[in-house]
Image (cartoon, rainbow, N blue to C red):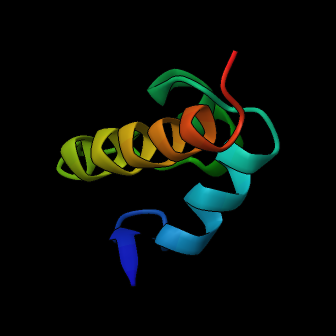
Amino acid sequence: MYVCVCKAVTDSQVAQAIDQGACTRRQLMQCTGAGGVCGKCSQSIKSLLDEKTCRQHVMHPA
Protein backbone atom coordinates (compact mmCIF):
# COMPACT_ATOMS: atom_id res chain seq x y z
CA MET A 1 0.00 0.00 0.00
CA TYR A 2 1.23 3.49 -0.78
CA VAL A 3 2.08 5.53 2.29
CA CYS A 4 3.39 8.58 0.44
CA VAL A 5 1.59 9.26 -2.82
CA CYS A 6 3.79 12.28 -3.63
CA LYS A 7 6.94 10.13 -3.78
CA ALA A 8 5.26 6.76 -4.50
CA VAL A 9 6.64 5.17 -1.32
CA THR A 10 5.02 2.00 -0.03
CA ASP A 11 4.68 0.67 3.49
CA SER A 12 7.06 -2.14 2.50
CA GLN A 13 9.73 0.38 1.55
CA VAL A 14 9.29 2.20 4.85
CA ALA A 15 9.51 -1.11 6.76
CA GLN A 16 12.67 -2.03 4.86
CA ALA A 17 14.27 1.33 5.71
CA ILE A 18 13.41 0.77 9.39
CA ASP A 19 14.93 -2.72 9.23
CA GLN A 20 18.08 -1.18 7.78
CA GLY A 21 18.40 1.20 10.73
CA ALA A 22 16.23 4.25 10.13
CA CYS A 23 14.71 5.09 13.51
CA THR A 24 13.27 8.60 13.06
CA ARG A 25 10.87 10.20 10.61
CA ARG A 26 13.71 12.42 9.39
CA GLN A 27 15.87 9.38 8.62
CA LEU A 28 12.95 7.72 6.83
CA MET A 29 12.46 10.87 4.76
CA GLN A 30 16.14 10.86 3.84
CA CYS A 31 16.04 7.16 2.91
CA THR A 32 12.73 7.02 1.07
CA GLY A 33 11.70 10.61 0.33
CA ALA A 34 8.40 10.03 2.12
CA GLY A 35 7.11 12.98 4.09
CA GLY A 36 9.19 15.57 2.30
CA VAL A 37 6.61 17.10 -0.02
CA CYS A 38 3.13 17.73 1.40
CA GLY A 39 3.41 16.00 4.77
CA LYS A 40 0.05 14.20 4.61
CA CYS A 41 1.80 10.88 5.14
CA SER A 42 3.69 11.95 8.27
CA GLN A 43 1.17 10.37 10.64
CA SER A 44 1.20 7.08 8.71
CA ILE A 45 4.98 7.05 8.71
CA LYS A 46 5.06 7.73 12.45
CA SER A 47 2.59 4.89 13.04
CA LEU A 48 4.68 2.45 10.98
CA LEU A 49 7.82 3.55 12.77
CA ASP A 50 6.23 3.18 16.21
CA GLU A 51 4.76 -0.23 15.35
CA LYS A 52 7.97 -1.57 13.84
CA THR A 53 10.28 -0.33 16.61
CA CYS A 54 7.89 -1.62 19.26
CA ARG A 55 8.01 -5.10 17.68
CA GLN A 56 11.81 -4.98 17.52
CA HIS A 57 12.00 -4.16 21.24
CA VAL A 58 9.67 -7.05 22.05
CA MET A 59 11.70 -9.44 19.91
CA HIS A 60 15.07 -8.19 21.20
CA PRO A 61 14.65 -6.99 24.80
CA ALA A 62 17.52 -4.98 26.21
Q: Residue at x 34, y 71 (%)?
A: 5
Work out whether residue 60 or residue 20 is closer to the camera in this orientation and state it. Answer: 60
Instruction: State the residue lying farthest toward the bottom.
Output: 1
Q: Image check: 56 left or right of 1?
A: right
Residue visible at 46% across and 37% down in the picture: 54
| Residue 10 visible in the shown view | no
Q: Position of residue 38 (x, y in %)?
A: 23, 45
Q: Is residue 6 visible in the rendered structure shown here?
A: yes
Image quarter of residue 15: bottom right
Foreground pick, 39 / 1:
1
Tell me the quarter of the image containing the N terminus.
Answer: bottom left
Residue in view at x 48 percent, y 69 percent = 11
x then y, percent, for residue 56: 62, 41
Judge left or right: residue 52 versus residue 5.
right
Residue 37, image x, y percentages: 35, 44
Residue 43: x and y in percent read: 20, 43
Identify the residue shown where x is 29% and y is 46%: 47
